[in-house]
Image (cartoon, grey):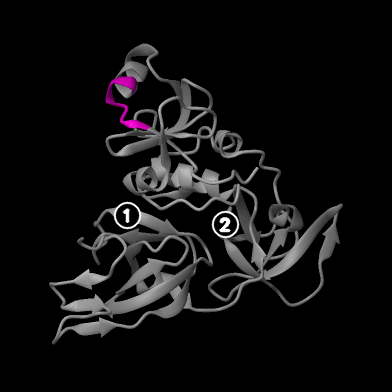
Amino acid sequence: MTADPRLFAHDPQRRWSEAPAPAGWHELRPSPARARSRTALRSAPEPLAAQVTEALPGEALERLADEGEWTWVRTVHDGYLGWARAADVGAGWTPDLEVEALRAHAYAAPRVSAPIVAELCRGARLAAGAGEVVTEEHRRWQPVTLPGGQAGWVQAVVLSPLAVPDPASFALTLLGAPYVWGGRSAWGLDCSGLTQLAYAACGLSLPRDADQQHAALSTVDVPRRGDLAFFPGHVGLMLDGRQMVHANATAMAVSVDTLGEGEYGGRLLASLRGYGRWPGPEAR
């Protein structure tokens, strides 16, 4: 079986490959790295190449090879390959804080009027900074070190875990979030980015792309809340037997649609390829 090029680093043009590399090729040796900010991973080392996925601030990466201003990396959490600007990839370090808010900012000082120094999102990783927590007008400010090494402050509330009863409930918190091809955060995400994020909020790890998610789940004929619905190149998360929440390029946002209802719902139902259910015990 041919290795999936989204996951296995093998480049005939550059004669690069991870082990086992063919004779005469350069064998890639991954080194630990972290994304300095929300970082686009592209299909090629070119600024206009398609974004295939996104690394969140502070997210763990493997650096595979460098070419000019670009570096070939793999996201550790799902093993996905892509090209990032080398300036957006830093050395490996050990964060000890995780952002729980859907969207957040880091500030230059512990007050809301201070300049914003970083854009954060759920899943961003930070390190506790030097100094003590500061209370200002009943707000608790946590000093942090950002993935690029810069000092900043975040309100402690953005680090507080959110109650997530199930993946469908989490997906609904993202209604209206912009559709972005390859995106994985509330600042912008695609269909499989939404389902991966929603399942992860409940401790369930899905692969990155819709076809990979389809292969990972158990096929069911009658959907229930939390199951995934699959279409050619698309995936949505079922709210019940007919309603589905999904990030889509028709609304250019996360929206709720009903299979078989209206012109768009009719097209969705006609192209439905089946439903998938988490194969083991549910996390909630």
- Answer with mark 2 or mark 1, whichever residue precedes in sequence: 1
Position above or below: 60 against 162: below
Q: Is-magenta flag for residue 234?
A: no
Q: Nearer the viewer, residue 233 or 224?
A: 224
Evaluate if marks 2 and 1 touch, with contact meaning CB atoms under 8 Å apart: no
Q: Residue furthest top?
A: 262
Q: Nearer the viewer, residue 271 or 39?
A: 271
Give the image quarter of residue 259: top left
The numbered disc on residue 52 is: 1
> Element under label 1?
strand
> Element under label 2?
loop
Q: Position of residue 217 (x, y in %)?
A: 42, 43
Using a 10 Å C-alpha cutoff, classify the residue at mark 2 as few (fewer than 14 neighbours), some (14 to 19) or many (20 or more).
Answer: many
Q: Nearer the viewer, residue 203 or 216?
A: 216
- Mark 1 belongs to which amino acid? Val
| Quadrant holding the C terminus | top right
Q: Provide the residue designation for mark 2.
A: 123
Q: CA distance from mark 2 to mark 1?
A: 18 Å
Q: Position of residue 159 (x, y in %)?
A: 70, 57
- Mark 2 belongs to which amino acid? Gly
Q: Identify which residue is drawn at 62% across, 67% down.
A: 126
Q: Position of residue 114 (x, y in %)?
A: 68, 59
